[in-house]
Amino acid sequence: MGICCATESAPEPPPVPKYLLCLRPNEAICYDIKTKKAHRAPHNLILASAGLCMYMETAYLIGGAATFDDCDTFIKILMRDGAIVDIQQLESIKPARSFPAAATIDGKRILSIGGYGKNTHSGASERLTLCNIYEDSKGWMKGGDLKYARSGATACVFQGTYVYCFGGVSHETDDPIEVINMKEDFPEWKSVVCFQRGWLAIESGYYNYRYASCAVSNSEIALVGVGGMYIYEPGTKRIQKKVAIENHTAATSHCLVEANGWLYYAYESMFAAYDWRAGKLTLELKPEDLF
């Protein structure tokens, strides 16, 4: 399947984010990429196994789990001038779910992709194919189902139009990648076969689990997680390992953004920066070391 083919005009480059959000139990850390300063804010959010996505100065947190029950929470986190200024509870997502992937297009449409929750027909808990889409004027709507049920996947927007979904825990053994074109009248997920099968399973030791992803150019997507940092090219369907690292990603939400040739990555117990073009890990800290 040909994705990111020639268009009448070149797509806009990904917007340059201002902040990186590190979510920890009882506190959120907002890291200002330009000033390299961090700000703490207390919270009582449910973070374990929630989906997280960001656009510019706003982050969205979807679902999660508390005391073994899946959650239907949908949270909006606003950041201004290097600080978290507001945390809002938005319309709950149904059914409740944990470990969804999340992505947002221009901050106007938010996608919850897959996850783990109850089958709406049988009531049994299982990995989900569900994709739900949120718009301020319409609330949560049903989107096209994934081809593969999965939880703990990662998703990102590419060229402002496509949403790619990678990995997660599923019944498949060939690293299923799926993509959806959100400009279509009735968007449907399509499968993409990566030429290097088993590319995450071999590295991670447990299948494709809890990576973060983001577009770094109009032709490349970065993934960071257990085992290393990778660059995937949708045009060629090839993936290359750029940095070997010993990350051990947690069940808490994690965040990956690209700014001016640098990848910034954070989760509960780690903050890192990568020169992704050179394939170098340049900084690795505990979040508390930012202060």
Image: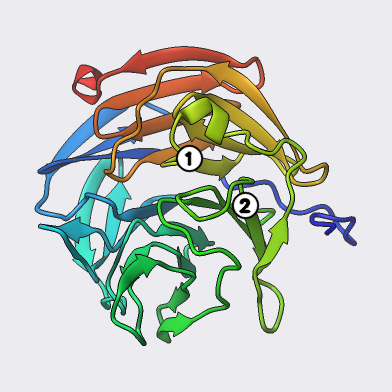
Which quadrant does the N terminus fall into?
bottom right
**Label at residue 75:** none
Secondary structure of residue under mark 1: loop
Is residue 33 shown to the viewer in this render?
no
Measured Cα–Cα span from mark 2 to mark 1? 11 Å
Q: Name the residue rendered at 50%, 14% in the picture.
A: 281
What is the x, y in percent for residue 213?
Answer: 52, 42
- Give me the residue at 28% from left, 43% from top: 251
Name the image quarter holding residue 86.
bottom left
Front one among 17 and 43: 43
| Residue at the disc numbered 1 | 207
- What's the residue at 21%, 50% (across, down)? 47
Classify mark 1: residues with Cα within 10 Å, few (<14), some (14-19) or many (20+): many
Determine whether 29 is above or below 129 in the image: above
Q: Are marks 2 and 1 in contact (CB under 8 Å)?
A: no
Within 10 Å of disc 2 (Cα), the crowding (few <14, some 14-19, many 20+) is many
Q: Which residue is mark 2?
A: 176
Can residue 145 be seen at all in this image of the molecule? Answer: yes
Q: Quadrant of the C terminus?
A: top left
Return the disc, 2 or 1, that comes first in the chain's sequence.
2
Q: Amino acid at mark 2?
A: Pro
Residue at 13 percent of width and 41 percent of height: 25
**Colouring method of the image:** rainbow
130 to 87, vertically: above or below: below
Q: Amino acid at mark 1?
A: Tyr
